[in-house]
Image (cartoon, rainbow, N blue to C red):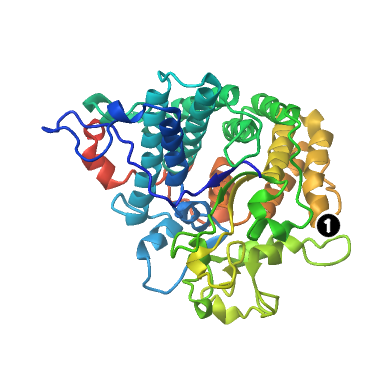
Amino acid sequence: MKAKLYILIAAIALLTASCNFLDENLKGGYSSENYYTSASKAEMAVNAIYNSLYGNTLWMFGDVASDDSVKGGADGDQPQINEIDALTATADNGSLGVFWQDSYETIARANNAIANIAPMNIDEKLKVRLLGEAKFFRAYTYFNLVNIFGKVPLKTKPQNTSASIHVGLSSVADIYGQIDTDLTEAIEGLNDLKDGHVNRAAAYALLAKSKVFQSKWDDAVQAIQGFKDLNAGYGLEHNYADLFKSGGEDSVESIFAIRYATNKIASQGNLLNVWFSPFIEGGYHFNAPTQSFVDCFSEKTVGGDDDPRLDASIGRAGKPWFNGTTFEASWGNVTGYLVKKYDEDAVEDMAKSQSTIPQHRIRYAEVLLLEAEALNEASPANVGAAAAALDQVRDRAGLAHTTASTQSAMRDAIRLERRRELGFEFHRFFDVMRYGRAYAVAALGSAAWPSDRYYFPIPQGETDANAALK
């Protein structure tokens, strides 16, 4: 099995440190002082970090805030997502608050695990692996936060003192510095197994992505070479659509994905199957793809057919849906399209809320596209090498090899391929913003934000609770 996330449905003990202002000792549970007593407890602490990534709101920022989709859904449902769509969200926006709380819950669990596992007297090989996993997740969470909010509190210690709770804003550069440090240290501790835990391949891939997002092209090339040197057997799945079916997390292409357990417990599967699916299936039809996304697939395959990634990614009128049905534009009553990557009909005795379709966060195809981008930006002399990486992705889609022969043309080709290849995997908004103000304004049709790029406001709840932000 590939390096993916197991969503642990069993109850896991809360692993937060006791606060220093309580008058009584914790009763009927664990504190940090009496919990970390064995290797099995240490593993449970790290498993709790995996569990914390169960939230399903990243799509609101990665997709809806971009030019790939609009809110969708019923007119009056979830109005706060309209503000995210329009880039007009204020600090009291509920969706911002949920994402922030979920993110810092993950960071808190990682911080607790790192601080308390490090001094434990357990098998050293297990210890460094567990610390590597915790650091990977802390890095991944801060990567999302820094791209959505920009400056955020950089918390790296258990929140059991006033100083560790009330933390001011850190610069974007400092946050990326912590991300890179965590991933570099994770690489040292993680193993190369594909056993359901994050591994060194995932850490190298995320480090390469972090370097690309910082425009540190040579460093990105070096991280990708580290990934390659693992010789871990990753590659492209033959059929793109198979990645987005139950079992897709076991693909040769899956590097870092959220996997959902087949336990048939209501509402504990991949709930995007409910959020994105048509109302005729009991879904909410959110995250409606735009015509702009459809139009970016104007290029035909070498056989003259539509790019197969389009119909694997979205439902559109007259095209096959599921179980022999044909999609109707009225199902996507906002734009005429709906996301398909997380949709499946209820099967056997499982409801839609028990879907086991994975959420891919890093795939081998993205590593190839990161390699192409890093090589191309590092030097105009690398255009040929960039084309070789890009064409692997295009080959799988049945497209002819790229004709881009200059650095500028290759840049445009890579950006277009990222949009098509990674559509509705929550990357697009991050890309639109990092490509620069001119690109973002052209894509989103707005220049309303005052600085080089748009960042969402820090939620009011954090400002109220964190004295360092007053």
Report which quarter residue 389 is drawn in: top right
Q: In the picture shown, does residue 148 fall above or below 290?
A: above
Q: In the picture shown, does residue 282 fall above or below 391?
A: below
Residue 239 lies left or right of residue 465; in this view the side is right
- Report helix, strand or loop for mark 1: loop
Q: Residue furthest right?
A: 303
| Mark 1 Cα-neighbour bin, 10 Å: few <14, some 14–19, many ≥20 | some
Instruction: Measuring from the top left, give residue 432's x and y in whole percent.
Output: 57, 47
In the foreground, 77 or 377:
77
Q: Identify the amino acid type marked 1.
A: Gly
Query: Is residue 70 something one can see in this rendering?
Result: no
Residue 251 lies left or right of residue 181; in this view the side is right
In the foreground, 66 or 354:
354
**Picture quarter with the N terminus:** top right
**Picture quarter with the C terminus:** top left
Instruction: Measuring from the top left, give residue 6's x and y in whole percent.
Output: 53, 47
Residue 186 lies left or right of residue 35; in this view the side is right
Q: Which residue is mark 1?
A: 398
Instruction: Measuring from the top left, give residue 34's x and y in whole percent.
Output: 29, 28
Seen at 46% across and 34% down, the residue is 43
Instruction: Measuring from the top left, give residue 91's x and y in whole percent.
Output: 30, 49
Q: Residue furthest left?
A: 23
In the foreground, 311 or 261:
261
Report which quarter residue 451 is drawn in: top left
In the foreground, 306 or 402:
306
Residue 48 lies left or right of residue 300; in this view the side is left
Seen at 66% across and 74% down, the residue is 321
Seen at 59% across and 42% down, the residue is 196
